[in-house]
Image: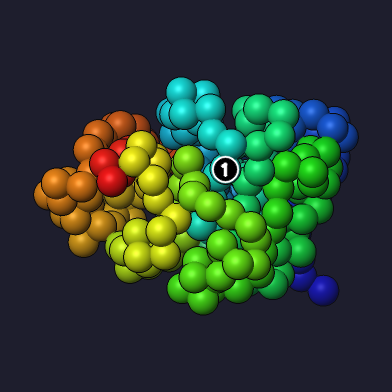
């Protein structure tokens, strides 16, 4: 029976990465997706921008919207301080099965909690069910038409504090026009665009970093 792209990505990790070495997991996925088949990981070029923002924020609590195969999950978690926690939301059970194995191969299970479900349903439960106060960093990389409603939902649920950082992938390609307009025009956010390229291509894309001002 035919394998799926996520299954082939997991295979590339198991064949080419070293157990317990997150950076080798990241490298194995990038090499596979650059040389064998494209996949919607944030990738190595935008990944360096992601690394710099994570290192600058040095977050104790991170929320990732959109796990997929766990590439950015592992990339972020590998840079977190000892007791920091990353919660990642994944809607597709098949993707979740793969991501859990990628996270395990990297040896990062203790830092990462993968929760299955829709962001719109899970965000209101963050405080009561997952014991979260606020998030220091949110990485948005799920369905592009959910970036804005979920940002408003996080505000309403008191999950953002003065200084919380939102980092959004794909603000150019595929594009998140309503989200971009909102964070760039709202007086409650200080936004900055990091120009880059769509993963594994020469097409323009970028990350938008938006600091919540409270
Ligand atoms: O479409 C894109 N991303 C959508 C990602 C969606 C992911 O978020 C999950 N989710 C988790 C929780 C939810 O509530 C909803 C979905 C979905 O189950 C999926 O795993 C995309 C597309 C391109 N592209 O070039 O076409 C490039 C990119 O970098 C992209 O990120
Ligand atoms: Mg993306």
Q: How many marks?
A: 1
Q: Is residue 124 visible?
A: yes
Q: Residue at left 51%, top 57%?
A: 65
**From the viewer's perspective, is 152 left or right of 107?**
left
**Residue located beneath label 1 in the image:** 61
Q: Residue at 70% across / 54% down in the picture?
A: 113
Whether ligand 1 has any atom under 8 Å from the Cβ at mark 1 is answered as no
Question: Dot 1: within a 10 Å radius of its alpha carbon, few (fewer than 14), some, or many (20 or more) residues?
Answer: some
Q: Secondary structure at mark 1?
A: strand
Q: Residue at x 35, y 65 (%)?
A: 156
**Quarter of the picture holding the N terminus:** bottom right
x, y (%) of residue 49? 43, 28
Residue 151 visible in rendering: no
Comparing 121 with 131, the one in front is 131
Give the residue displayed 69% in from the left and 72% down from the top: 93
Q: Is residue 131 above or below residue 85?
A: below
Residue 98: x %, y % from top left: 75, 59
On the image, the x and y values in percent for residue 114 come to 69, 58
- The x, y position of residue 123, in whole percent, is 50, 66
């Amino acid at each position: 029976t035919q394998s799926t792209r996520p299954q082939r990505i997991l295979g590339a990790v198991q064949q080419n990465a070293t157990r317990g070495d997150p950076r080798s997991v990241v490298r194995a996925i990038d090499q596979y997706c650059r040389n064998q088949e494209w996949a919607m990981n944030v990738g190595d070029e935008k990944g360096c921008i992601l690394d710099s923002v994570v290192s600058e924020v040095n977050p104790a609590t991170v929320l990732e919207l959109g796990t997929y195969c766990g590439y950015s999950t592992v990339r972020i978690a590998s840079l977190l301080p000892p007791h920091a926690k990353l919660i990642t939301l994944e809607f597709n059970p098949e993707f979740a099965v793969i991501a859990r194995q990628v996270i395990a191969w990297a040896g990062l299970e203790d830092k990462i909690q993968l929760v299955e479900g829709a962001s719109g349903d899970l965000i209101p439960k963050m405080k009561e069910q997952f014991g979260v106060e606020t998030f220091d960093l949110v990485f948005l990389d799920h369905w592009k038409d959910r970036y804005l409603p979920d940002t408003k939902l996080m505000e309403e649920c008191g999950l953002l504090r003065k200084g919380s950082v939102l980092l959004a992938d794909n603000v150019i390609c595929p594009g998140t026009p309503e989200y971009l307009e909102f964070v760039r025009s709202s007086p409650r956010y200080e936004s900055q665009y990091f120009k880059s390229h769509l993963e594994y291509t020469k097409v323009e894309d970028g990350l938008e970093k938006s600091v919540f001002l409270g």
